[in-house]
Amino acid sequence: MQVSETRQKMNRVQQFRLYLDNTQSLDDVYNLLNQLSSDVLDMYPHIACRTQCNSCCKGTSMPAITPAEWAKVHDYLLRFYTEEQREALITRTREMYNPRKALYWGVHDTIQQPANMDKLRSFREVLTQLTDTQCPMLVNETCSVYMSRPAKCRAHGGFLYVFGEYTQLHACESEVEKMEIKLKEQGSRNVLMPVWNDFEARIVEKFNEPNATSTILPIWLLTHLHKGELIEDAVAEPDFEAFREKDM
Ligand code: SF4
Ligand code: SF4
């Protein structure tokens, strides 16, 4: 990488809030996330997220999705999935959800908490019980909604996540451990990365209705079925409580 190119990437990451404030659509935010993620991975070559890793789509990682992001996934499922693919998606989502519905709602409830250490503890408690699941959109080890994937899926590995006083790499445990080793080697805890929480706040506040509820993809999908088929229009605020106790 040439020096001017490196400087350009560093400037972009340093000024990410300015770029973020200028986003006018969810697509703008997605494009910015893609660009910054690529910039950060270029600056920190030890981060493994570039290698088509899909471990984030399995087990303990359950991205929180706002209604506006779900609407994009929903639209993608209607336009680009075949009827058979949608049927298979609904079946595998139900198979994962029904035996574990209390845990899935545990994740849902945790998502609604403010970002602090209690929330981090709640996530650790509930997510560690979901290691045998995966995102229903993961098909043949690949994200089947890649072009419409939610913001959080675009931010793995290259962003910081702030929980109250505590800041960590927005990544899997092995990447967090690797980063800790790098920080010890460099002798300081300074890292140049955008903050995921700022993106989350922008998406919630600017591109969703006030007080919109975020939840996980399996719950979004299962609250959008009628007679076993995906309904035509995405609903920003389904009656989540009506679904909580049901098998779906
Ligand atoms: S954070 Fe970890 S699991 Fe996720 S993409 Fe990066 S290397 Fe893979
Ligand atoms: S939407 Fe795609 S990238 Fe995101 S968790 Fe699901 S499979 Fe992975």
Image: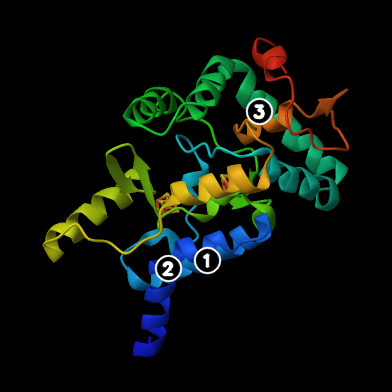
> Please, which colouring scheme is shown?
rainbow
Q: Which one is nearer the viewer's eye here, 124 or 239?
A: 239
Q: Please tell me which of labels 1 and 3 falls first in the chain.
A: 1
- Name the residue rendered at 34%, 88% in the picture: 3
Residue 198 coordinates in the image, percent (x, y): 47, 50
Tag of residue 15:
2
Tag of residue 19:
1
Residue 16 coordinates in the image, percent (x, y): 45, 64
For mark 3, what is the residue?
Answer: 219
For residue 33, say whether it is visible.
no
At label 3, the amino acid type is Ile
Check disc 1 and report its element: helix, strand or loop: helix
Check disc 2 and report its element: helix, strand or loop: loop
Residue 131 coordinates in the image, percent (x, y): 45, 30
Q: With 15 as the anchor, is 188 left or right in this view?
A: left
Mark 3 or mark 2, whichever is nearer to me: 2
Q: With 230 as the anchor, is 1 left or right in this view?
A: left
Label 1: how many Cα within 10 Å (few below 14, some 14–19, many 20+): few
223 vs 50: above or below: above
Q: Which one is nearer the viewer's eye here, 25 or 182?
A: 25
Q: With 146 as the anchor, is 79 left or right in this view?
A: right
* Viewport quadrant of the N terminus: bottom left
Residue 89 is drawn in which quadrant?
A: top right
At label 2, the amino acid type is Gln
- Name the residue rendered at 51%, 29% in the picture: 111
Label 2: how many Cα within 10 Å (few below 14, some 14–19, many 20+): few
Q: Which one is nearer the viewer's eye here, 146 or 75?
A: 75
In contact (CB < 8 Å): disc 2 and disc 1: yes
209 vs 73: above or below: above
Q: How far apart are marks 2 and 1 (CA)?
A: 7 Å
- Name the residue rendered at 30%, 65% in the picture: 46
